[in-house]
Image (spheres, rainbow, N blue to C red):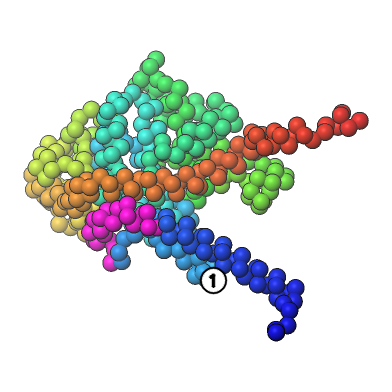
Amino acid sequence: AGSPMGPARGAILIFALASAILALSVFVRSSRSDSMVLRRAPQATARLNRIFSHASKSPLTLPSQRQLSVCAEATEKPERKKRVLSGIQPTGSVHLGNYLGAMKQWVDNQDKYDNFFCIVDLHAITVPHVPKELKKSVAQTAALYLACGIDPAKSKIFIQSHVPAHSELTWLLNCATPLNWLERMIQYKEKAKKQGDSVSVALLDYPVLMASDILLYQADLVPVGEDQKQHLELTRDIARRFNDQYCKGNQAKKLRGTSRPVFKEPEVLMAKEAARVMSLQDGTSKMSKSAPSELSRINLLDSPDVIREKIKKCKTDSELGIEYKNPNRPEATNLLTMYSQATGRPVEDLLGEVSDMSWGQFKPLVADALVEQLRPIRERYDEVTKDPEVIAQVLQDGAEAANEVASATASWARQAMGFTSVEEIKETLSTPTAAATK
């Protein structure tokens, strides 16, 4: 007969048994979840691997299929990547200006940052729109995110309206934002002039919705162009005002368990060589989805013939030769910028070859370069849209990841402003007041 088990050994055995049961339950839940994902779309992963083979030698895995490496992460404690938030409106067709000015930088920086890229459909309805066209544009934009090279294993791709916290936080921030801050926004003034009496409240509130987009994800960096810098400054002002009003003293520690306030003030992410692509019909205006003429822009899905026709008909001048950054020749600067971006060669090098050319000689070079630059995007778009399940799965996984982060931030904001839960109400009512105690 062995010696009876001592209390210490018994406690150790019970602890080990409990740990084993807990580990087994976690493993079972994880395995069940992973097997569901694997059954859901193995073909989708294979197709995405083919699409992204140009960008990475390692096989692509969707976010929900990645193997957990908790032990390795806990041991190595890698430095947290800075978080980036950006998005594009699903209005009209995604064009060359969107790609060179934003999406190309997203793709180039995927390994460097923790990325959240959304399709901002809530912003799209701040101006008059056709519902059927909006649905089509959202689907097309999602496919183009993938076709341009955004890898869902490295970046979260989601639709803004699929995360309810965007709308909720916008209302909370509205209650902390002075009206005169919005009335001085330059973009609102410009668009309000065009729309006249039909301008919506939503257009005035557009910058607060944008602030909500950014602050929800505790973004460190936001890539913005010159025309959006004022909106980012407003976002910082709103975050600072909210934190000052509702997160003073020990309040932040009660909310988050740390001294950090509810919202992080984001910084501008400046691209080293962000291309500013102008209209083909007016070299002083940005290439835009809302411009009435299709000849003013190169859409990413334009056919080679359409691209060549648009470049052929684009506005030029009567001057001889091609120049760069001559304020009197904005169209020459614009076409040379596009040519440089399409060929990957510095403008200074190209000037030595094209400065003495006529427009008739230079335009075909630009058109051919653009056709070749956009060809892979069109081919990947055709490939990914053959299986809508690919896009649906990516968007679902992205929305789940986005909701997890956004709901936490929205919860902190609600608590900071004094909103309460049913449990807290019960606790409050069951606690005797000072008067009742007396």
- The percent position of residue 227, horizontal first and vertical second, equals 39, 38
Q: Secondary structure at mark 1?
A: helix
- The magenta segment is 34-57
Left/right placement of residue 80 relative to residue 313 reads right
- The percent position of residue 107, horizontal first and vertical second, equals 33, 54
Question: In the orientation shown, which residue stands out farthest toward the top?
Answer: 197
- The percent position of residue 131, horizontal first and vertical second, equals 30, 26
Q: Residue at x 41, y 36 (%)?
A: 161
Residue 419 appears anywhere in the view: yes
Q: Nearer the viewer, residue 290 or 1?
A: 1
Q: Nearer the viewer, residue 153 or 189?
A: 153
Query: Which residue is denoted by mark 1 in the rendering?
Result: 75
Left/right placement of residue 38 relative to residue 388 reads right
Residue 22 position by quadrant? bottom right
Residue 320 position by quadrant? top left
Image quadrant containing the N terminus: bottom right
Q: Which amino acid lies under the numbered mark 1 shown in the image of this protein?
A: Thr
Principal secondary structure, stretch drawn in magenta:
helix
